[in-house]
Image (spheres, rainbow, N blue to C red):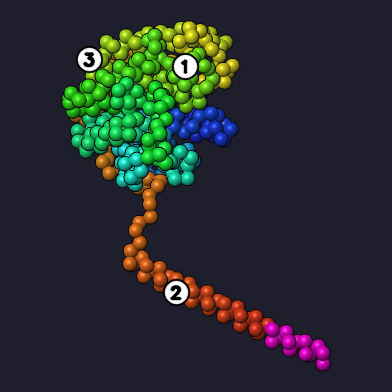
């Protein structure tokens, strides 16, 4: 939290220093939302409420004009996944019974529903690639022509959680439709259960970018656990187990978390600041999986414990001798400054690794029938989804446009006639003056 300045005078609540183009720091808007979620889990795991007021302030400050986490000043980096991360933190606040905001402020469950409703709008699920959310929301943003796993994975995950919290099966139905789409475009490998990044719409999502990031696998694995907990359907247990086995094998070699693009072949410094936070998300999400699907508990916590020990072992840097780096599997501290990485991601990762062990015996996410207090609004959101198409032109529109055009033409004609008359009068007066001068 020493890297967060949103609660200081003159700073913006909710965000980490950035975005990169501003020169203020390396962090995009979404990572502030991820930090808020990390600190909600921290409060739940430790009971330390020191940061609760700061977290509440940050979450409420960024809701945007329509209270759906689409603030206009972050449009240039507004993706479905970015909006979704803030929605995940609001959902987590409801599930963890994080203190409710004042009654005149938007409530956690309603904010999560607003994000989900906005993303469920048909205009965000066009016919390219037979459906699916695009990466970016505004059509002018770079990446609008890409449909990625994390955007659709968050929508799937939130749908499963909203179904469980509210007992409204509509959310589960949409979650399953999103799963079916991810499976049909083979962003989830049908043999290995690897989870890939996404594809462009120009290839109809057939040329898949098979890069593997831990948060893609993690968000879908946790979503499957929520679906299994809600439906009790064995097909979701089977999907959960297959995803979990693939995730642990790929991202926890030697039982220590790694981020493949950053750490494969001992390669360092190839991560973006975004990627440096993924390992922590996966630790937190897997700890919740054990609460939803107890049969996974022994397998998951055995690995999380070993990974957390490795994370702590390398926190020996800086003047304090307790600064953490990113490369847990190296067995030694690698200075983020020398390695050209950042600090917020590394620290969120280690904090998540440690506190995930405290979730071993923790209460599972609550619902509105098991102690949840957050008030919802099933109709929240959807007022400004950022990419609505023009409505079809009707005969009334055409007639109205015709009257308007005629009116404008008549006005323009009158103005032209008046200006011509004025010019003609000026010419006559000028000629008279010239004649008088000659006389």
Gap in angstroms between the C-alphas marked 1 and 2: 68 Å
Percent of width and height locating residue 354: 39, 13
First in sequence, mark 3 or 2: give its number. Answer: 3
Secondary structure, mark 1, is: helix
* Closer-to-camera residue (246/256): 246
- Residue 430 shows up from this direction: yes
Q: Give percent across and percent down for residue 247.
A: 34, 19
Q: Is residue 15 above or below residue 141?
A: above
* Residue 406: mark: 2
The answer to whether residue 100 is visible is no
Q: Which residues are magenta?
A: 427-439
Report if residue 432 lies within the magenta region: yes
Tell me which residue sits at (33%, 64%) in the image.
394
Relative height, residue 312 to residue 113 (above, below): above
User: Which corner quadrant holds the C terminus?
Assistant: bottom right
Looking at marks 3 and 1 on the same chain, the residue that comes earlier in the sequence is marked by 1
Q: Which mark is residue 295?
A: 3
Q: Observer-nearest residue: 176 or 421? A: 176
Indicate the secondary structure of the residue bearing disc 3: helix
Discs 1/2, front: 1
Residue 336 appears left or right of 349: right
Residues packed near mark 1 inside 10 Å, few (<14), some (14 to 19) or many (20 plus): few
Say whether marks 3 and 2 touch (CB < 8 Å): no
- Checking the image for residue 225, the label placed there is none
């Amino acid at each position: 939290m020493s890297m967060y300045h949103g609660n200081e005078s003159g700073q913006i609540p909710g965000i980490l220093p950035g975005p990169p183009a501003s020169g203020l720091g390396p962090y995009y808007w979404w990572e502030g939302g991820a930090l808020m979620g990390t600190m909600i889990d921290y409060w739940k795991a430790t009971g330390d409420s020191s940061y609760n007021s700061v977290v509440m302030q940050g979450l409420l400050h960024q809701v945007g004009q329509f209270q759906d986490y689409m603030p206009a000043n972050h449009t240039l980096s507004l993706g479905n996944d970015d909006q979704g991360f803030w929605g995940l933190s609001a959902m987590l606040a409801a599930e963890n019974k994080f203190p409710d905001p004042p009654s005149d402020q938007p409530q956690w469950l309603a904010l999560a529903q607003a994000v989900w409703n906005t993303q469920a709008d048909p205009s965000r699920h066009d016919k390219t690639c037979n459906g699916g959310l695009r990466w970016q929301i505004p059509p002018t943003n770079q990446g609008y022509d890409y449909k990625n796993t994390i955007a659709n994975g968050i929508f799937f995950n939130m749908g499963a959680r909203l179904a469980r919290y509210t007992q409204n099966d509509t959310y589960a139905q949409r979650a399953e439709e999103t799963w079916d789409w991810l499976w049909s475009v083979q962003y989830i490998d049908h043999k290995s259960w690897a989870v890939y990044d996404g594809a462009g719409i120009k290839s109809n999502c057939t040329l898949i970018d098979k890069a593997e990031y831990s948060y893609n696998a993690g968000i879908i694995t946790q979503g499957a656990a929520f679906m299994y907990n809600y439906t009790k359907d064995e097909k979701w247990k089977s999907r959960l187990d297959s995803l979990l086995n693939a995730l642990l094998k790929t991202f926890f070699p030697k039982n220590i978390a790694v981020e493949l693009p950053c750490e494969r072949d001992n390669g360092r410094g190839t991560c973006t600041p975004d990627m440096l936070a993924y390992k922590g998300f996966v630790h937190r999400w897997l700890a919740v999986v054990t609460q939803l699907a107890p049969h996974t508990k022994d397998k998951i916590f055995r690995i999380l414990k070993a990974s957390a020990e490795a994370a702590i072992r390398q926190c020996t840097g800086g003047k304090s001798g307790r600064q953490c780096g990113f490369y847990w599997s190296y067995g030694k501290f690698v200075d983020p400054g020398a390695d050209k990485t950042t600090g917020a991601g590394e620290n969120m990762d280690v904090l998540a690794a440690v506190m995930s062990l405290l979730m071993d015996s923790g209460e599972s996410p609550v619902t509105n029938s098991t102690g949840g207090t957050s008030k919802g609004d099933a109709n929240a959101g959807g007022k400004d989804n950022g990419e609505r198409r023009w409505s079809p032109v009707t005969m009334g529109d055409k007639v109205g446009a015709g009257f308007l055009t005629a009116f404008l033409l008549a006005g323009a004609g009158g103005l032209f006639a008046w200006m011509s008359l004025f010019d003609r009068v000026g010419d006559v007066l000028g000629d008279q003056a010239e004649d008088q001068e000659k006389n």
